[in-house]
Image (spheres, rainbow, N blue to C red):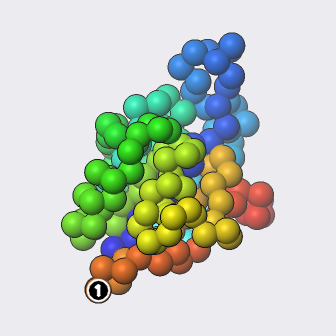
Amino acid sequence: MKLFLVRHGEAVSSNVDPERPLSEAGKAVVSKVGRHLKGLGIQVEEIRYSTKARARDTAKIIASKIAPGMVPAETPGLKPNDPVEPVAEELEQEQKDIMIVGHLPFLPTLAARLLGESKPPEPIGFPTAGVVALVRNDEGVWSAEYQIRPEQIKG
Protein backbone atom coordinates (compact mmCIF):
# COMPACT_ATOMS: atom_id res chain seq x y z
CA MET A 1 0.00 0.00 0.00
CA LYS A 2 1.18 3.49 -0.81
CA LEU A 3 0.12 6.58 1.06
CA PHE A 4 0.70 10.06 -0.32
CA LEU A 5 0.60 12.83 2.27
CA VAL A 6 0.10 16.24 0.68
CA ARG A 7 0.18 19.56 2.47
CA HIS A 8 -2.29 22.07 1.07
CA GLY A 9 -1.07 24.83 -1.21
CA GLU A 10 -0.55 28.46 -0.24
CA ALA A 11 -3.79 29.99 1.01
CA VAL A 12 -5.01 33.56 1.18
CA SER A 13 -4.83 35.20 4.60
CA SER A 14 -7.83 35.13 6.88
CA ASN A 15 -8.03 38.93 6.45
CA VAL A 16 -8.78 38.41 2.75
CA ASP A 17 -11.15 35.45 3.23
CA PRO A 18 -11.86 33.75 6.57
CA GLU A 19 -12.36 30.43 4.75
CA ARG A 20 -8.73 30.63 3.50
CA PRO A 21 -9.03 29.09 0.02
CA LEU A 22 -5.92 28.74 -2.12
CA SER A 23 -4.34 31.90 -3.43
CA GLU A 24 -3.74 32.24 -7.18
CA ALA A 25 -0.05 31.45 -6.58
CA GLY A 26 -1.07 28.45 -4.47
CA LYS A 27 -3.32 27.15 -7.25
CA ALA A 28 -0.49 27.47 -9.77
CA VAL A 29 1.99 25.57 -7.58
CA VAL A 30 -0.52 22.83 -6.74
CA SER A 31 -1.29 22.47 -10.43
CA LYS A 32 2.45 22.11 -11.15
CA VAL A 33 2.75 19.45 -8.44
CA GLY A 34 -0.29 17.63 -9.85
CA ARG A 35 1.23 17.58 -13.33
CA HIS A 36 4.47 16.27 -11.86
CA LEU A 37 2.63 13.50 -10.00
CA LYS A 38 0.85 12.55 -13.23
CA GLY A 39 4.21 12.42 -14.99
CA LEU A 40 5.47 10.04 -12.30
CA GLY A 41 2.49 7.78 -12.97
CA ILE A 42 1.04 8.26 -9.49
CA GLN A 43 -2.35 6.60 -9.15
CA VAL A 44 -4.54 6.41 -6.09
CA GLU A 45 -7.93 4.87 -5.49
CA GLU A 46 -9.01 7.58 -3.08
CA ILE A 47 -8.15 11.17 -2.21
CA ARG A 48 -9.22 12.39 1.22
CA TYR A 49 -9.02 15.97 2.45
CA SER A 50 -9.77 17.89 5.64
CA THR A 51 -12.79 20.11 6.04
CA LYS A 52 -10.70 23.23 5.39
CA ALA A 53 -11.11 25.12 2.08
CA ARG A 54 -7.38 25.13 1.28
CA ALA A 55 -7.22 21.33 1.57
CA ARG A 56 -10.36 20.93 -0.55
CA ASP A 57 -8.98 23.19 -3.28
CA THR A 58 -5.65 21.33 -3.27
CA ALA A 59 -7.32 17.91 -3.44
CA LYS A 60 -9.55 18.93 -6.34
CA ILE A 61 -6.68 20.36 -8.37
CA ILE A 62 -4.48 17.29 -7.84
CA ALA A 63 -7.38 14.94 -8.61
CA SER A 64 -8.00 16.79 -11.87
CA LYS A 65 -4.39 16.04 -12.88
CA ILE A 66 -3.86 12.45 -11.71
CA ALA A 67 -7.40 11.04 -11.72
CA PRO A 68 -9.79 13.08 -13.87
CA GLY A 69 -13.35 12.33 -12.84
CA MET A 70 -12.40 11.23 -9.31
CA VAL A 71 -14.26 13.13 -6.62
CA PRO A 72 -12.05 13.68 -3.56
CA ALA A 73 -13.73 12.93 -0.22
CA GLU A 74 -14.04 15.48 2.56
CA THR A 75 -12.98 13.49 5.61
CA PRO A 76 -13.41 14.47 9.25
CA GLY A 77 -10.43 14.00 11.53
CA LEU A 78 -7.79 15.54 9.25
CA LYS A 79 -7.70 19.12 10.59
CA PRO A 80 -4.42 20.61 11.81
CA ASN A 81 -4.71 19.60 15.47
CA ASP A 82 -6.84 16.47 15.19
CA PRO A 83 -5.42 13.33 16.83
CA VAL A 84 -3.61 11.08 14.35
CA GLU A 85 -4.19 7.76 16.09
CA PRO A 86 -7.67 7.05 14.63
CA VAL A 87 -6.41 7.79 11.10
CA ALA A 88 -3.24 5.74 11.62
CA GLU A 89 -5.26 2.77 12.86
CA GLU A 90 -7.57 2.98 9.86
CA LEU A 91 -4.63 3.21 7.45
CA GLU A 92 -3.06 0.10 9.00
CA GLN A 93 -6.08 -1.85 7.66
CA GLU A 94 -6.22 -0.28 4.19
CA GLN A 95 -5.08 -2.14 1.09
CA LYS A 96 -5.64 0.53 -1.55
CA ASP A 97 -3.34 3.42 -2.41
CA ILE A 98 -4.61 6.64 -0.84
CA MET A 99 -3.75 10.34 -0.85
CA ILE A 100 -4.46 12.52 2.18
CA VAL A 101 -4.43 16.29 1.74
CA GLY A 102 -4.03 18.10 5.03
CA HIS A 103 -2.08 20.44 7.26
CA LEU A 104 0.69 21.02 9.76
CA PRO A 105 1.11 19.66 12.38
CA PHE A 106 -1.23 16.77 11.50
CA LEU A 107 0.66 15.40 8.47
CA PRO A 108 4.16 15.21 10.00
CA THR A 109 2.68 13.78 13.20
CA LEU A 110 0.85 11.11 11.20
CA ALA A 111 3.99 10.30 9.22
CA ALA A 112 6.00 9.94 12.44
CA ARG A 113 3.36 7.65 13.97
CA LEU A 114 3.27 5.39 10.91
CA LEU A 115 7.07 5.28 10.71
CA GLY A 116 7.31 4.37 14.41
CA GLU A 117 9.08 7.60 15.32
CA SER A 118 8.35 10.07 18.10
CA LYS A 119 8.76 12.90 15.60
CA PRO A 120 9.14 13.00 11.81
CA PRO A 121 12.61 11.94 10.65
CA GLU A 122 14.74 15.00 9.92
CA PRO A 123 14.77 14.75 6.10
CA ILE A 124 10.98 14.64 5.84
CA GLY A 125 9.39 18.04 5.42
CA PHE A 126 6.02 19.41 4.45
CA PRO A 127 6.32 22.73 2.60
CA THR A 128 3.07 24.03 1.11
CA ALA A 129 2.05 21.72 -1.76
CA GLY A 130 4.75 19.25 -0.69
CA VAL A 131 4.21 15.50 -1.01
CA VAL A 132 5.60 12.66 1.09
CA ALA A 133 5.15 9.10 -0.19
CA LEU A 134 5.05 6.31 2.37
CA VAL A 135 4.84 2.62 1.55
CA ARG A 136 3.75 -0.27 3.75
CA ASN A 137 5.35 -3.64 3.06
CA ASP A 138 3.73 -7.07 3.39
CA GLU A 139 4.81 -7.27 7.04
CA GLY A 140 2.96 -4.04 7.81
CA VAL A 141 6.09 -1.91 8.23
CA TRP A 142 5.96 1.62 6.84
CA SER A 143 8.89 3.42 5.23
CA ALA A 144 9.33 6.79 3.58
CA GLU A 145 9.78 6.21 -0.14
CA TYR A 146 10.35 9.79 -1.34
CA GLN A 147 9.23 13.38 -1.02
CA ILE A 148 8.49 16.09 -3.51
CA ARG A 149 9.16 19.73 -2.78
CA PRO A 150 7.51 22.09 -5.28
CA GLU A 151 10.66 24.19 -5.67
CA GLN A 152 12.53 21.11 -6.97
CA ILE A 153 10.10 20.63 -9.88
CA LYS A 154 11.33 22.13 -13.10
CA GLY A 155 8.85 23.97 -15.29
Q: Position of residue 40 (x, y in %)?
A: 55, 72
Q: Position of residue 144 (x, y in %)?
A: 52, 75
Q: Tell me if mark 1 has few (under 14), some (14-19) or many (20+) residues whose alpha carbon lies within 10 angstroms of its own.
A: few
Left or right, residue 110 beside residue 150: left
Quadrant occupied by the N terminus: bottom left
Whether residue 4 sits left or right of residue 23 in the image: it is left
- Identify the image quadrant of the C terminus: bottom right
Q: Vertical placement of 45 versus 82: above or below? A: below
Position of 64 relative to 144 (above/below): above
144 or 110: which is nearer to us? Answer: 110
Relative placement, left or right, of 109 versus 148 is: left
Position above or below: 95 against 26 = below
Judged from the image, the secondary structure of the residue bearing numbered disc 1 is loop
Amino acid on which disc 1 is placed: Glu
Figure quadrant of residue 116: bottom left
Residue for badge 1: 139
Q: Where is residue 65 in the image (x, y as percent from the top left)?
A: 51, 53
Quadrant for residue 140, please give it.
bottom left
Name the quadrant containing residue 54. Answer: top right
